[in-house]
């Protein structure tokens, strides 16, 4: 899927709209009937495209620009409603994900052991899909250890996390909210429990909503139970 142009990818998910509504394009905020500033072709007006499932409208050149500023993985996500077309991937840098069961219980789960996930990402040089291509990125606090009770729901979550890892969605490169350091490896919107025996940081157990929350976070990255059939 990599190597396809924006035009090839987007054409799969849109219909051309001949009579668009009198609204602004949510990407450039210019009226749909006017030309987007992403349109470099002075002569030609902008086509308006409608995403086929969610039916949101955009300038064609805005959708192309959005695709070209992302991971270019053959997928797009509607900027208005977050509907995903194709398989969404991220720009997580190279590293490893391992997991095993340890014979200790987490708070609130006295009758089962614990799944420990270990992520390791070394520092490196940013690629074209990263915010500052060619610059170095740092990596702090690795290996990062994460915990789930070894029960049925968590075993499903683990399988979804493995898919998220393969799609490069667990980490990204950016500025750490915690340390303020730029160009470093940071968590990417899928919350993990990194505290083992207590919950001082808010990243531990007990947390009664955790399973629902992480399943929702995985789903907003396009990783749902449906994906498990393919694996
Ligand atoms: N454990 C798990 N998640 C965390 C932690 C933590 N200790 N600290 C922050 N997060 C969550 C935040 O709630 C936010 O949603 O990660 C997201 C990104 O926050 P950043 O501070 O930008 O992330 P990062 O710099 O990667 O991590 C901060 O997490 O695992 C630890 O060692 C790591 O101390 C570092 C901390
Ligand atoms: Zn939409």
Image: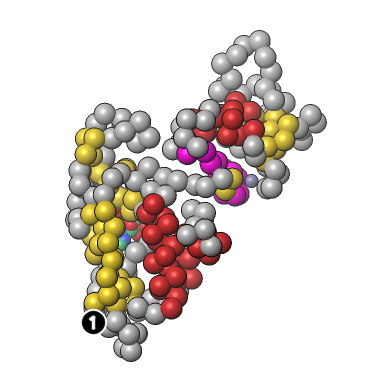
Could you tell whether 114 is left or right of 45 in the image?
A: left
- Which corner quadrant of the image does residue 133 belong to? top left
Q: Position of residue 176 (x, y in %)?
A: 28, 48
Residue found at x 42% / y 57%: 163
Residue located 34% across and 50% down the image? 171
Q: Position of residue 108 (x, y in %)?
A: 34, 85
Residue furthest bottom in the image: 111
Tell me if I can see residue 17 in this picture. Answer: yes
**Could you classify mark 1 by the number of other residues whose Cα lies within 10 Å: few (under 14), some (14-19), or many (20 or more)?**
few
Compared with 38, 67 (above or below) is below
Q: Nearer the viewer, residue 115 or 213?
A: 115
Would you place residue 94 above or below residue 98 in this image? Answer: above
Q: Which residues are magenta?
A: 73-83
Q: Is residue 55 magenta?
A: no
Q: In this rendered view, identify the residue nearer to me: 124 or 226.
A: 226
Question: Relative to 109, is 52 above or below?
Answer: above
Residue 160 screen position, x and y as percent: 44, 62
Using residue 121 as the reference point, say whether residue 61 is left or right of it: right
Where residue 203 sits, quadrant-wise, is bottom left
Q: How is the image coloured?
A: secondary structure
SS label for mark 1: loop
Q: Position of residue 140 (x, y in %)?
A: 19, 51
Residue bearing mark 1 = 103
In the image, is 18 to the left or to the right of 176? right
């Amino acid at each position: 899927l990599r190597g396809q142009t924006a035009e090839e990818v987007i054409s799969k998910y849109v219909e051309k709209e001949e009579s668009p509504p009198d609204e602004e394009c949510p990407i450039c905020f210019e009226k749909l009937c006017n030309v987007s500033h992403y349109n470099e072709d002075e002569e030609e007006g902008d086509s308006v495209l409608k995403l086929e499932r969610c039916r949101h409208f955009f300038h064609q050149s805005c959708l192309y620009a959005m695709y070209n500023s992302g991971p270019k993985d053959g997928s797009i996500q509607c900027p208005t409603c977050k509907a995903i077309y194709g398989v969404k991937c991220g720009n997580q840098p190279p590293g490893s994900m391992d997991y095993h069961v340890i014979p200790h219980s987490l708070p609130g789960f006295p009758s089962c052991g614990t799944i420990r996930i270990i992520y390791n990402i070394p520092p490196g040089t940013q690629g074209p899909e990263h915010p500052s291509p060619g610059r170095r990125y740092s990596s702090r606090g690795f290996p990062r250890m994460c915990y789930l009770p070894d029960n049925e729901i968590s075993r499903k979550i683990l399988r979804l996390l493995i898919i998220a890892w393969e799609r490069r969605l667990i980490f990204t490169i950016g500025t750490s909210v915690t340390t303020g350091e730029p160009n470093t490896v940071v968590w990417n919107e899928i919350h993990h429990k990194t505290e083992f025996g207590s919950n001082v940081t808010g990243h531990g157990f007990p947390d009664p909503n955790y399973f629902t929350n992480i399943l929702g976070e995985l789903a907003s990255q396009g990783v749902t139970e449906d994906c498990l059939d393919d694996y």
